[in-house]
């Protein structure tokens, strides 16, 4: 949410806005609505084409972005099976409506093989104060329902440009492990960062340390 806009009017397929928080805007950026409620389908035509490509190269895992509910995951699974793909499906939990109730959370978890707490887009839609409890609840429910859970986004973001993480990042990763996450996922830190190897080592060290603490208690 680095650039924030307030909608002032809507005319057909045109949306007029006022910039409330400005900044540089590059191409290929996503958009979120605070509070959720965007009507866009979870699977675009490109997504459907990508599922066919995924089947051709026989991927082991297929991540579905912005699923609204369990039915979106069931639909993706049907498309994958029709294409001959038996991959495990990962639900990237990014929409406010997906975590609105305990029932909606269980619905998305049960329809998936793996659940990802995708904190970037989800945090924009529900706000950081809400994200704290939602992350913990998603991890707890995924484990209760015997699903793998991944915690992702800004785990060690400062290491894109720094060889060492901040203490806050260390504690964030450790707390996710102590909450019961099965994995933490890096993004820009390794995709575009200056210290990808150091980042992986730092995250691994913190995870091992947190797991030892959990076992000791």
Image (spheres, rainbow, N blue to C red):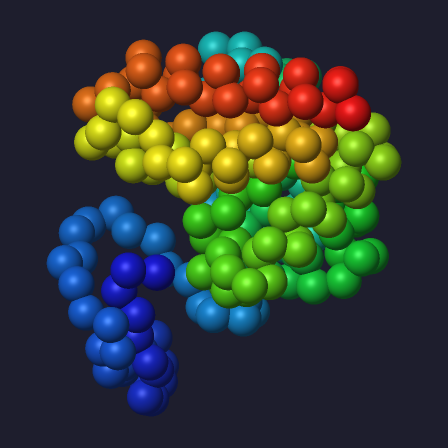
Please state which of residues 71 and 106 is positioned toward the viewer in this rendering.
106
Q: Residue furthest bottom?
A: 9
Residue 124 appears at what percent x and percent y?
45, 60
Residue at image x 26%, y 78%? Answer: 20
Answer with left or right where residue 46 lies relative to residue 23: right
Viewer-side residue, 25 vs 11 = 25
In the image, what residue occupies the spot 33% across and 88% down? 9
State left or right for residue 140 relative to residue 167: right
Q: Is residue 54 above or below residue 125?
A: above
Q: Give coordinates of residue 157: x percent, y percent.
A: 34, 37
Residue depicted at 30% across the width and 70% down the height: 4
Which one is nearer the viewer's eye here, 199 or 53?
199
Residue 129 on image: x %, y % = 55, 63
Residue 43 in view here = no
Q: Quadrant of residue 211?
A: top right
Q: Quick one: quadrant of the C terminus?
A: top right
In this rendering, is residue 84 above or below 169?
Answer: above
The image shows residue 23, relative to residue 147, as above or below, that is: below
| Left or right: 41 in relation to 197 | right
In the image, residue 113 sits, relative to residue 68, either above or below, namely above
In the figure, is residue 20 to the left or right of 74? left
> Residue at position x 66%, y 55% from top?
133
Q: Quadrant of residue 166?
A: top left
- Asked where in the image residue 207 lies, by quadrant, the reply is top right
């Amino acid at each position: 949410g680095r650039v924030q806009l307030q909608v002032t009017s809507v005319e057909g397929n045109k949306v007029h806005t006022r910039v409330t928080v400005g900044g540089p805007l590059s191409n290929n950026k996503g958009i979120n609505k605070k509070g959720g409620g965007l009507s866009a389908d979870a699977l675009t035509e490109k997504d459907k084409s990508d599922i066919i490509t995924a089947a051709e190269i026989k991927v082991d895992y297929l991540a579905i972005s912005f699923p609204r509910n369990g039915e979106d995951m069931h639909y993706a699974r049907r498309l994958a099976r029709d294409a001959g793909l038996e991959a495990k499906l990962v639900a990237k939990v990014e929409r406010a409506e997906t975590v609105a109730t305990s029932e909606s959370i269980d619905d998305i978890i049960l329809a998936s093989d793996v659940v990802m707490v995708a904190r970037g887009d989800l945090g924009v839609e529900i706000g950081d104060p809400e994200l704290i409890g939602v992350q913990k609840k998603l991890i707890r429910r995924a484990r209760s329902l015997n699903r793998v859970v991944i915690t992702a986004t800004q785990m060690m973001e400062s290491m894109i440009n720094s060889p060492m993480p901040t203490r806050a990042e260390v504690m964030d990763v450790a707390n996710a492990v102590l909450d019961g996450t099965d994995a933490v996922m890096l993004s820009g830190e390794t995709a575009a960062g200056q210290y990808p190897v150091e980042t992986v080592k730092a995250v691994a060290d913190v995870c091992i340390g947190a797991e030892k603490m959990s076992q000791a208690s």
